[in-house]
Amino acid sequence: MNETWGISGPQFLAWYGIVLAVVLMVQVVWPRVARTRAVEHTGELPDVYHLAYLAGGPERVADTAIAALVDRGLLRVNSEGLVTAAGKRPWHKIERSVHEGAKGATGGTTRSLRAKAARSKAMSDLETEMQRTGLLTSGSEARPFHTTVLLAYLVLLVVGAVRFVTGAANDRPVGWLFLLLVVALVLTIVAGVVRSRKRVRITPRGRGALTRARSSSSTQGAAQPALLLAGAAGAVALGGLAMYPDDELSAALIPPFQPFAGSGGGSPGGGSSCSSSSSCSSGSSCSSGSSCGSSCGGGGGCGG
Amino acid sequence: MVDRLGVGIGWRTELDLSIARLPGVDWVEVVAENLHAPHLPESLLALRQRGMPVLPHAVSLSLGGAEPLDTQRVEHLAELARALDAPLASDHVCFVRAGGLDSGHLMPLPRTPEALDVLVANVRLAQSIVDVPLALENIAAVLEWPENTLSEEQFLTELTERTGCLLIVDVANLYANARNVGTDPAAFLDGIPWERLAYVHMAGGVERDGVYHDTHAHPVLPEVLDLLAELRHRTDPPGVLLERDDDYPTDTELAAELAALRATVTA
Amino acid sequence: MSREELAARQAALLDALLTGAPPPPGFAPERLRVEADVLLAKRRRLMAYLRPNLAESLGERFAPLFDAYAATHPKTDTIRAREYADAFATWVADREPAKRRRWFRN
């Protein structure tokens, strides 16, 4: 009796296992090789927002912009953590989006500004830029590779399944093939998940840039990066809002602990804090006329 | 008779840390309706501890209203003045509520002897509740009552004579009235009993469609600074206060506005 | 003019300015319009201050919606500013069930 497809069961099993292993190896090793290759394509120096992203993601970028703007007087924080925009709008895209978010009578909080910044076009532009300069990986550039891997697994799965069905129909032993099929199925699912996941990751080059920035900011004198990281923005980029050089402002900017805080943005401070610990002072100012729920519900404004 | 206050700024919760750090702030004024004596904000208490005068300024007493005075609101102001150990408390020459409606804004009074009688009666009642001197401020109007018989300075002068109250002269409001309802600023400045002056208010505004709006959200106009200089020719005001309530500028710009006020009154 | 007459005149003025009632005799109509706009703008700003999330989620429709509400529901002297803000929010939510879901989620 002829072997199915003219190849014996054990031979098929061996080849099937080998091909599966090779695909798996390529899947694991290639992205690392590609990442080290990607490092070479640009010589641009990272700026303070790139470093903030490398040190703490989009949230740190927002914190750094807040710090930079507070330092320059374009954002004002009050003792309750209410952040309001002041003066002219800044030039830098990230700073502009944070400044925008703190506009209006009610301003924002560190939390709400982080949430708004994370959703902003400026942030996705920053990510794109960092991908272009090799500081971040992008899910999208690795996608064709992951698609190929997934297709390879699918082909193996189909071939194995057909062999299994014909083998079983001819009363051949299919126990080992069944095991390999299960392995192939699992690997296919994993490949599918990896392909659909679009995660932005820091490249070795990104990690290197951050390490250099950290060491040069601790050892003063290294000319260029130190200059880059000067001031409040640099301190916050690497160390978070706790590193803002002014303790009072730092304390005001760090969001209060919230047991059920999600990643979403808290509502801006402002008007709604009558019931908060402080007092109605956070309610309306003179311009807004009436008080918050005091005995004096009404009231005119100041200037008339 | 009136304490010398110097140059101050309207305390707003958004500005609290800025105000504590701004150079050239001798005192602050708070909007009475936004605060409660038992729960004063920490940042405001810190200013008090530094010895900075904090003066409560009400916007809702409706002292010119013909309906019975809401004494609860006056009690609130009195309580706040005590809690802040303020040298005086204030509201406006206006009405806010009538016929069950709340305008949410300061409305001009008819300047007639009858309206003055009503105002005087309410002010006397308020004075009996507030245990510090009461000061009243001229408002900015965009409309005038047809029955007006007295000028604004006559009205204010008679008010102070009959009640012994002090005056807050808002120079921006004077400018607004000159632009919007044709008040003569020189006549006003000549007719005010300056010995009754508690302090001066200064604020920014903007002109839209031929009407000057007293927004407190724009820089002080040079014309308003000129009027302050005119006022300075007639008296040395015990205090000058900058009001800014919206679209806050940077600390640097606020400091520059305060410095400009100081330069104008010390010139 | 007695205190009662003055009270009636003041009430008529506020009525005209806040609810669009006929202008009381003697006032310049175009000045009444300017004053009515000033009062409405002030109330609108206060509402945006007290309900920032609502104002933001309504976007450009906030002003016309508030103006429509204010014209039919002038603030009375018995309701507090925050209660008035709550009443407006409820009014908006009742009118726009879809919007309601959106800003509740925010």
Image (spheres, rainbow, N blue to C red):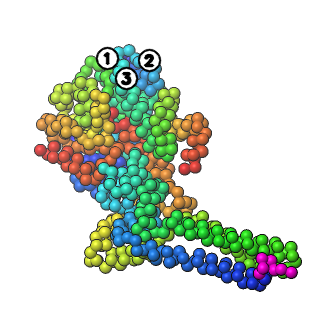
* Callout 1: chain: B
Examine the rendered structure and indicate whether residue A297 appears above or below residue A256. Answer: above
Question: Distance from label 1 to label 2 (Cα)?
Answer: 18 Å
User: According to the image, label 1 marks what residue?
Assistant: B147
Residue C78 vs residue A7: left or right?
left
Label 3, label 1: how far apart the Cα atoms are: 15 Å
Task: Report the number of numbered marks.
Answer: 3
Provide residue A176's location: percent of width, then percent of height: 78, 81
Task: Write the residue at 35% across / 48% down.
Answer: B12
Q: Amino acid at mark 2?
A: Pro
Judged left or right of residue C69, residue B265 is left
Camera-side residue: B143 or B253?
B253
Could you tell me which quadrant the N terminus of chain A lies in? bottom right
Question: Does residue A282 show up magenta in the picture?
Answer: no
> Do discs 1 and 2 belong to a common subunit?
no
Q: Compare marks 2 and 3 and give the one earlier in the sequence.
A: 2
Q: Residue at x 25, y 53 (%)?
A: B252
Label pair 3/1, CB-CB below 8 angstroms: no
**Label 3 environment density (alpha carbons within 10 Å; few <14, some 14–19, many ≥20):** many
Give amino acid for label 3.
Leu
B84 vs A199, nearest the viewer: A199
Is residue B239 placed above or below A140 in the rendered structure?
A: above
**Residue B33 in view here:** yes
Q: How much space separates mark 2 and mark 3, taking CA atoms? A: 11 Å
Residue under numbered circle 2: C22
Magenta-colored span:
A1-7
Q: Relative to A46, is B73 above or below?
A: above
Q: Position of residue A183 (x, y in %)?
A: 71, 76
